[in-house]
Amino acid sequence: MSDYPLTVLYDASCPVCKLEMDNLRERDQLNKLNFIDASAPGFDVAKYGVSLTEVMRVIHGIKPDGTVVTGVEVIHLAYRAAGLGWLTAFSNWPILKPICNWGYEHFAKNRHWVSEVFADSILRIAARRAEKRSRACKEGRCNIK
């Protein structure tokens, strides 16, 4: 069974998380990823068979067969879908997998604090991306995904 399309449930109220999901969305040329903001009003968690508490604790992915994956596994699958799997391949190596999972758990727990610390950098990156997208529109037509 294929891992794609993968539905990614993430917390867009976290600036770092939103920035990275926007990055992956732009790179997902084959439309293998479906991004759902779990922090949005009206988000229907029951539709996915998971709890809102868990979804807001760590990133979740739902495979086509309904299998739920979390954390680093979701990140690796999303990067792979975006053609960047080589960046996260090490996270599946047996010796590094527990370390990566531990690191992700600590990042997820502190993601809003991390976002505050790196707020200026996040804003600069987001502004550069917005400028790039605006240049993609010419003669009344946009080539933005």
Image (cartoon, rainbow, N blue to C red):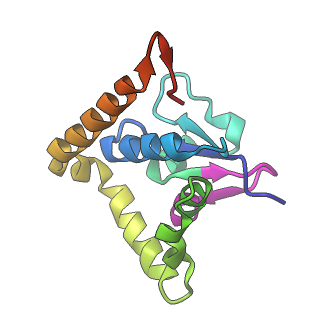
Q: Residue furthest top?
A: 140
Q: Which residue in the rendered view is the most extreme toward the front?
A: 139
Task: State the residue in front, 131 or 123.
Answer: 131
In magenta, the rendered stretch is 61-75
Among the 4 quarters of the image, the one containing residue 108: bottom left
Residue 129 lies left or right of residue 54; in this view the side is: left
Picture quarter with the N terminus: bottom right
In the rendered image, which quarter is residue 15 located in? top left
- Residue placed at 40% from the left, 47% from the top? 20
In this picture, residue 47 sits left or right of residue 98: right
- In the rendered view, tell whether residue 92 sits above or below residue 26: below
Indicate the position of residue 26 as horizontal and vertical percent values.
49, 40
| Total marks in image | 0
Q: Measured from the top left, where is residue 100 in percent x and y?
A: 44, 74
Residue 67, image x, y percentages:
74, 56
Res. 114 visible in picture: yes
Image spot of residue 137 (x, y percent): 43, 20
Residue 80 belongs to the span the image colors magenta: no
Side (left or right) of 124 relative to 8: left
Q: Nearer the viewer, residue 118 or 112?
A: 118
Residue lying at the far bottom of the rendered structure: 95
Residue 10 visible in the current orientation: no
Give whichever of 89, 130 is nearer the camera: 130
The residue that appears at 47% across and 84% down in the rendered structure is: 96
Identify the residue shown where x is 46% and y is 44%. 21
Left or right: 106 as drawn, with respect to 119: right
Query: Toward the viewer: 96 or 124?
Result: 124
Which corner quadrant holds the C terminus?
top right
